[in-house]
Amino acid sequence: MTDFSKIKAITFDVDGVMTDGGLLCFDDGNFLRIFDAKDSFGLRMAQMNGIKLAVITGGTSPSITQRFRKCGVELENIYLHSRDKILDFNDFCNKYGFAPEEVAYVGDDIPDVEVIRAAGLGVTPADGVAEAKEAADFVSPFPGGKGCIRDLVERVLKAQGKWEFKVDAYLKQY
């Protein structure tokens, strides 16, 4: 049985986790990503309840930073253009004094496997690649961009007795 109660931080990839992996490419080289509002709200719930958040992505678009700042991720915890994700994961853990066992990581593809294995709770969406599923402690029943992050946040907060929406805190922060 997976123990969600010990998690103090959630780290995650973007494309294939917070999105379904699809990218609309414009002539100028910029991409358009579609995010699920429930996943984004889940991140806000995590942040409001003391769960530290970090993005570790190979993506480089300024829109990634803008999106996740609005979800409560601190700027210094948004790792763009990550080519060796374990380095960024370790940097995040060291920055806050987290043992890897206290941190969840959600990834869907081969560049995520090392971090999935290193994290205390390695997670992949239902549509993660076979290697990610083999490495994961937990395979979400939800695919990337369709509730995977929300599912994880809800499980963590419920295990910790913190799944409660506080309107006053929400109004102050968002």
Image (tube, grey):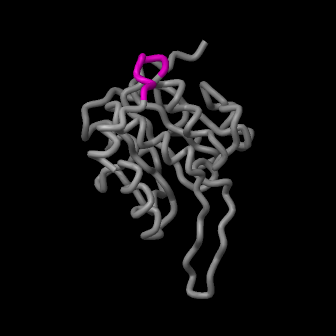
Q: Quadrant of residue 5?
A: top left
- Tally the numbered discs: 0
Which of 32 and 172 lies nearest the eye of the viewer?
A: 172
Which percent across, then down, holds residue 46?
Answer: 41, 35
Which percent across, then down, holds residue 14?
Answer: 54, 53
Which of 18 and 134 lies nearest the eye of the viewer?
A: 18
Which residue corresponds to the image point at 40% horizontal and 64% vertical from the top-left?
66
Which residue corresponds to the image point at 31% horizontal and 45% vertical from the top-left?
171
Which residue is the extreme one toward the bottom? Answer: 27
Q: Is residue 102 left or right of residue 137?
A: left
Which of 42 and 109 lies nearest the eye of the viewer?
A: 42
Residue 163 among magenta residues: yes
Q: Is residue 110 above or below residue 5?
A: below
Q: Is residue 44 above or below residue 22?
A: above
Task: State which region is magenta.
Answer: 158-164
Which percent across, then down, holds residue 99?
Answer: 34, 26
Which percent across, then down, holds residue 106?
Answer: 54, 39
Which residue corresponds to the image point at 60% horizontal and 51% vertical from the top-left?
36
Q: Quadrant of residue 10?
A: top left
**Viewport quadrant of the N terminus:** top right
Magenta span: predominant SS is loop
Which residue corresponds to the image point at 32% horizontal and 36% vertical from the top-left?
93
Q: Quadrant of residue 107?
A: top right
Residue 121 among magenta residues: no
